Image (cartoon, rainbow, N blue to C red):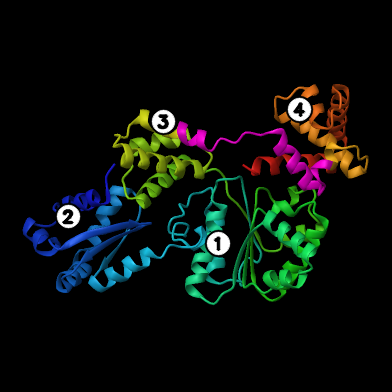
Amino acid sequence: MQSVSDIWSMILTRLREDLSETTIKTWFDETTVVALEGNTLVLHCSNSFKRTNIQDRFLPNIEAGLKDIFSADISVRLLDDNMLRQYQNKEEQKPTSLMESGEFTFDTFVIGPSNRLACSAARAVADAPGQHYNPLFIYGDSGLGKTHLLYAIAHVIRNNSPNFRILYIKGDEFINDFIESVRSGKAGDFRTKYREADLMLVDDIQFVAGKVETQNEFFHTFNTLYESKKQIVLTSDRPPHEMAQLDDRLRTRFEWGLMADVQPPALETRVAILKNKAAQLGFILSDEIAHYIANKITANVRQLEGTVKKIKAYKDLDGIDINRETVDRAIQDMSRSSEFIITPEGIIREVCRYFRIEEEQIKGQSRSRDCLNARQIAMYLIRRMTSLSLDDTGRIFGGRDHSTVYNSVGKVEKKMKTDSNFSGTVKAIITNINSSK
C-alpha cells in the first residue's frame, strides 16, 4: 500500500533500471506527482524544455513502470504551469451528480468475460447514439455495473455532443413523475421532459411492470423517441420475458435492439476490479491481498469496491497496516454498514406500490379483488421473509386472527403452483423488495 507520492518514487526506482542516475536527475528533478485520477497519473513539470523531453523520450518508460505496478494500463498526463492552474480550478468545481463525475466512465470499468458484450454494446451506443442497438437492454443482478455503464455512456456523449439532451431516470421515479403529472394536471410538461430527450437512460425499468397506465405512457414515450432515432438504454434485474406483468407491447419493443446480460465477475476480473479501484483511490493493492479479497467476495462489484474504500480509510485515518486480518475487518464492517433487513413494513410498502393501493386499504376491511390479493400476498411474504408469528402478522392487518393468516398463506402457496401469472406477480414483488435495499 502506497500513497500517490510513493508511487512516483517507485516509478523512479524502476526508471533507474533502464536509465542512468545522471539522466534521472537531469530530466526528472523538477517533476512532481499531482494525482492519480482514474486510470491516469497526473504529473507536473514547470520547465517546458524538460517537460517536452519527458513527453517525447520517457513517457513509454513511465507507463511501462505503471503497468508493472498496477497490472493495468495507466496513462500519463504531464502538465505545465498553466495546465496545472486549469486542472486545479477544474478540481474545485464539484460535479452535481455521480453521472457528471469522472468516476463512472469506460476507462474505470473493468472488462471481463462476464460483462464484455454489455460493455462493447454500450461503447458502440456512446460513439454513435441512435445508430446501433436501439434500444440497448442491459440486465443482471444488483451491484454488477449496469448503472456504471449508463453513466459511462452519458459521459462520452456529453463530451462529444455538449448540447445533447440527456435524461437519466430510475423506473420508480418515472412512475412517480407520471402520477404527479396526472395529479397536478401537468401532463404536457411531463411529455416534454421525456419525449424531447436525445438520450434516455432508464435504470431498473422492471418497476414499471404491472402499472397499466404507467406502461401505456412509457409505451408512447418509447415510440416517440425511437421513431425520432433517439437513443434509449434500459437496465433491469431480469430480461423482458421474465417480467410477468410487463405489457406485451413493451416486451417486444425492449427486445427490438440488443439484450446484453452482466454476470458475476470471474476471479481474475474481481482481482482486476480491486486493483483498478485502489489505483483510482491512489494506492497499490498487492496481488496477495487482492486475491484474498476476491476469494472472499465473489458476486458483487459494489461490495468489492466498498471494501477497497474501507481499506483506504483504515490506512489514511488509522495508519493501519493492511493484512488479512485488517481485510476481514473491512469486509465485516462494510457488510454490516450495508446490511439490508427485510421488515413487515417494507414488504407491505412494496406490495401496496405494486398493486397501487394505500396501506390503510390493505390493513382494513376492503374485499376488492386487488386489495384481497395484495393482503394475502403480503401475509404470505411476511411469513416467508420474516420471523413474525401468525398472531403477530394478523395484528398488523387490523387485528386478524392467526387462522386468517394461516389460510391466506395456504391460498397463496396453492395458487402459485397452478397459476403461472400469479406466481410471476409474487416473484416480481419479491424482486422489488430485494431491490429496495
Label 1 environment density (alpha carbons within 10 Å; few <14, some 14–19, many ≥20) = many
Residue 307: mark: none
Badge nearest the viewer, 2 or 3: 3
Amino acid type, label 3? Arg
Q: Nearer the viewer, mark 1 or mark 3?
A: 3
| Alpha carbons under labels 1 and 3: distance apart | 36 Å
In the picture, the quarter occupied by the C terminus is top right
Label 2 belongs to which residue?
15
**Mark toward the start of the polypeptide (4 vs 3):** 3
Indicate the quadrant where residue 323 lies: top left
Q: Residue at x 37, y 52 (%)?
A: 280
Q: What whole-number distance in Å separates the C-alpha atoms at marks 2 and 3?
A: 37 Å
Instruction: Verify whether residue 412 appears in magenta.
Output: no
Q: Check if mark 2's residue and mark 1's residue have beta carbons within 8 Å.
A: no
Q: Position of residue 238 (x, y in %)?
A: 68, 48
Q: How many marks?
A: 4
Which is closer to the viewer, label 4 or label 1? Answer: 4
